[in-house]
Image: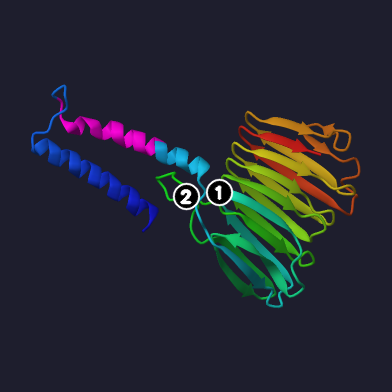
Amino acid sequence: MGRNQLVWGSILLLLGSLMLAGQMGVRLPNGASLMDLFWPILLLGAGLWVLAGVFIRGNMETQNASIDLQGASAVDLKISHGAGELKIHSGANANEMAHGSFMGGLSHKANRNRDRLEVRMRPVKDAIDFPFLGPMSRLDWDIALNENIPTALNLNLGANKSDIDLRGMNITALDLDTGASETKLTLPSQGRFKADLDLGAASLEVIVPEGLSARIRTSLGAADLKIDQSRFPRSGGYYQSPDFDSAVNAVDMTIDAGAASIRVR
């Protein structure tokens, strides 16, 4: 039985029982109808259900999956992930685009477009069945990517905790969009690429490997921003490594954020 079926069934039984008791003339000691108890009981039950979601973890199977590279020479990869923990790092085999373990299951599409493989990865279903935030099933994912294949990476993250280690990977472009999340991002150490980081009420730590130059432009709301200016001194409206224009390895980074905490080092 689905979680929503259980909750809706319980609500209907409660409502029907109180209505039946009222029709039979059953009254509270103060003379009020039993229907007056419906909303207090419903709110108390909803509160207990939400609290249960904090302490009880739902059971979800973990799927191990591999995505074949299909002989492509470049990859366009989009990963969507919600509640739970997400780990991304190198380690896929030469003939793989990616492999990993996916709690709750993986839904993916992989289409070859000339020499480029277009891949979309998302959970089979959401961790929380809206609108009831009861016992929660976390979607913990651990993904290993092919470090040698040129990859344009798009990450669309919800309320999760992420450790994204791209050090040593061949990332041609990075697009990160997060909600209420906690993210640790280690950038690639090679190549010249753009990184667009769009944050909501989030915590973000960006690690720029030694040898990677950076230009960092920001558009912030009520954000707490700390950037290592010994490496990236402020120059007008942005922060930039002294050798950014001539560096072989460099990232052109843009950060758009609301109420966020951001560290770049």
Magenta span: 32-47
| Residue 46 on the magenta span | yes
Which of the 4 image quarters holds residue 79? bottom right
SS at circle 1: loop
Is residue 79 placed above or below 162 in the rendered structure? Answer: below
Q: Is residue 202 left or right of residue 124?
A: right
- CB under 8 Å between discs 2 and 1: yes
Q: Residues within 10 Å of mark 2 (few under 14, many from 20)?
A: some
Q: Where is residue 15 shown, x and y percent of the image?
A: 22, 41
Q: Residues within 10 Å of mark 1 (few under 14, many from 20)?
A: many
Q: Where is residue 48 shown, x and y percent of the image?
A: 41, 37
| Residue 212 on the magenta span | no
Mark 2 lies on residue: 128
Instruction: Say whether disc 2 or disc 1 marks the residue closer to the N-terminus.
Output: 1
Is residue 255 placed above or below 57 in the rendered structure? Answer: above
Is residue 42 placed above or below 153 in the rendered structure? Answer: above
Question: How did the renderer colour the structure?
Answer: rainbow
